[in-house]
Image (spheres, grey):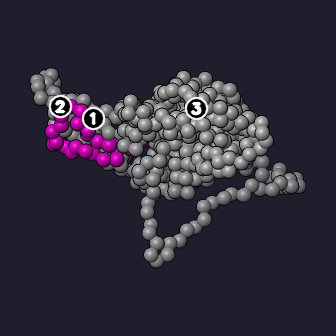
């Protein structure tokens, strides 16, 4: 019998590990080609791993909940057919292999135990299991760990970061001790220490329901707190008359659904206008790296999508400025539908340069969204409401019933000032209010 190794696949450019959330097949189970073997989760997306071959699972090498690096063998499948003749290992080799496996198993258990006993719950940063185990072994406190600058994705602390810190750790402490007497000889500087904020202690009362956050909600919470720490948020608002858009959609929606077998909503119209405006003001389509501004060449717009379980995911429309309205409508519908069914590929939620979120779906007039790092701006769409509005005509001012909505733009004040934020909103308003109500689709 031939044996086939199932490895942890690479699910995206920045993905280096994944968590096994559930085995769909057990040892001894027969599998067909393309049968789902297990479910895995990364900090980007959840996925099912299919079997590339037909056979029987003879070994699973990791348990549910284990964090596995990309490229590691996670299971072995025995296939029908003649296997290559392998030399039978000697008793010595078998004994050595058992000893090595026992040592490796004990090391894994020790690392898992160290991670479980160390309290990282109060931290707003993400730390990989390897970094946590090193911190535990080297008696690095959480306060000390928080001070280590990270070079990984979203400023995460990598293995090399913590090892570099350990090399200079003793030297840094010696320098502090050497400088301490000098400071006692001089007058203290009149400085105000920065306050350190900690989450308040929360107690539950009788009858309260306690629900543990799921993995995705924890990631969302960490990402939101990180974004508010990283970017000084400013939000500007503008009113937009979208009467032409509402009338045009009402006119074409039935014919479009009959012809294309899908609905035309307002979202693709707003995303098309947002993409055009980003071309006009490219500094809003950017990221900040220290003191450098990275102005993005591609316009990849993330579309915040609410999931049935109450969580949020942001699929990305790549090259949004190159799509016409039909292409945009199809992209929006496809990504939204597959997001709600957990069928997105990892690459489809990466690479965004700007985000649009629709408060109007839930009848909210407006909102102040949090920037999706490492982007520098996010556009909020409010609900469309009929309102009496003063219109200027050649016969004089009149009051008319118009379809009005509020757009909000939250932006990173490190590189986007109020003037630029205001100009972006004014330009997108111009595009929307001058929408051609006679165009065909």
Lateral position of residue 5 relative to residue 382, left or right? left
Q: Are marks 2 and 3 in contact (CB under 8 Å)?
A: no
Lateral position of residue 158 relative to residue 28, left or right? right
Residue at the image position 18 percent from the left and 34 percent from the top: 32
Q: Which residue is mark 1?
A: 50
- x and y, in percent, of residue 215 in the image: 43, 50
Lateral position of residue 364 relative to residue 112, left or right? right
Sequence-wise first label, 1 or 3: 1
Q: Residues within 10 Å of mark 3 (few under 14, many from 20)?
A: some
Res 388 label: none
- x and y, in percent, of residue 219 in the image: 49, 48
- The quarter of the picture where residue 347 lies is top left
Residue 413 lies, with reference to residue 199, above or below; the image says above
Q: Which residue is mark 3?
A: 437
Q: Residue most toward the right?
A: 187
358 is within the stretch colored magenta:
no
Residue 169 in sight: no
Q: Residue most toward the front?
A: 395
The span picked out in magenta is 19-42
Residue at the image position 56 percent from the left and 48 percent from the top: 360
Residue 322 lies, with reference to residue 182, above or below; the image says above
User: Which sits in the foreground, 223 or 147?
Assistant: 223
Q: Residue most toward the bottom?
A: 206
Q: Residues within 10 Å of mark 2 (few under 14, many from 20)?
A: some
Q: Which residue is mark 2?
A: 54
């Amino acid at each position: 019998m031939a044996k086939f190794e199932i490895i942890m696949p690479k699910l995206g450019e920045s993905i280096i590990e994944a968590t096994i959330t559930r085995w769909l097949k057990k040892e001894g189970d027969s599998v067909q080609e393309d049968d789902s073997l297990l479910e895995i989760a990364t900090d980007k997306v959840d996925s099912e791993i299919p079997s590339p071959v037909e056979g029987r699972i003879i070994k699973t090498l990791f348990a549910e909940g284990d964090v596995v690096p990309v490229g590691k063998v996670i299971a072995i499948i025995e296939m029908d057919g003649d296997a290559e003749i392998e030399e039978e290992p000697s008793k010595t080799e078998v004994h050595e292999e058992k000893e090595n496996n026992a040592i490796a198993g004990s090391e894994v258990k020790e690392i898992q135990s160290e991670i479980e006993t160390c309290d990282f719950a109060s931290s707003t940063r993400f730390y990989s299991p390897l970094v946590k185990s090193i911190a535990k072994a080297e008696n690095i406190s959480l306060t000390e760990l928080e001070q280590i600058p990270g070079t990984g994705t979203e400023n995460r602390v990598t293995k090399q970061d913590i090892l570099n810190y350990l090399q200079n750790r003793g030297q840094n402490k010696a320098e502090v001790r050497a400088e301490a007497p000098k400071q006692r000889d001089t007058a203290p500087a009149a400085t105000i220490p920065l306050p350190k904020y900690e989450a308040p202690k929360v107690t539950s009362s009788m009858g309260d329901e306690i629900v543990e956050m799921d993995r995705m909600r924890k990631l969302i919470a960490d990402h939101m707190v990180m974004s508010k720490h990283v970017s000084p948020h400013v939000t500007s608002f503008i009113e937009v008359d979208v009467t032409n858009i509402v009338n045009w959609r009402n006119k074409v929606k039935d014919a479009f659904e009959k012809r294309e077998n899908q609905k035309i909503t307002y979202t693709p119209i707003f995303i098309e206008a947002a993409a055009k405006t980003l071309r006009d003001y490219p500094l809003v389509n950017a990221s900040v790296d220290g003191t450098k501004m990275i102005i993005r060449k591609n316009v990849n717009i993330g579309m915040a999508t609410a999931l049935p379980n109450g969580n949020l995911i942001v699929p990305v429309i790549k090259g949004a400025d190159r799509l016409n309205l039909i292409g945009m409508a199809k992209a929006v519908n496809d990504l939204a539908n597959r997001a709600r069914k957990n069928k997105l590929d990892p690459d489809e939620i990466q690479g965004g340069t700007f985000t649009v979120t629709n408060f109007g779906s839930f009848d909210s007039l407006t909102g102040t969204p949090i920037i999706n790092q490492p982007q520098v701006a996010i556009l909020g769409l409010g609900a469309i409401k009929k309102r009496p509005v003063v219109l200027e005509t050649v016969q004089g001012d009149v009051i008319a019933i118009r379809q009005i909505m509020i757009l909000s733009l939250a932006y990173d004040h490190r590189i986007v000032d109020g003037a630029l934020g205001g100009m972006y909103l004014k330009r997108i308003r111009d595009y929307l209010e001058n929408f051609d109500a006679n165009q065909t689709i």
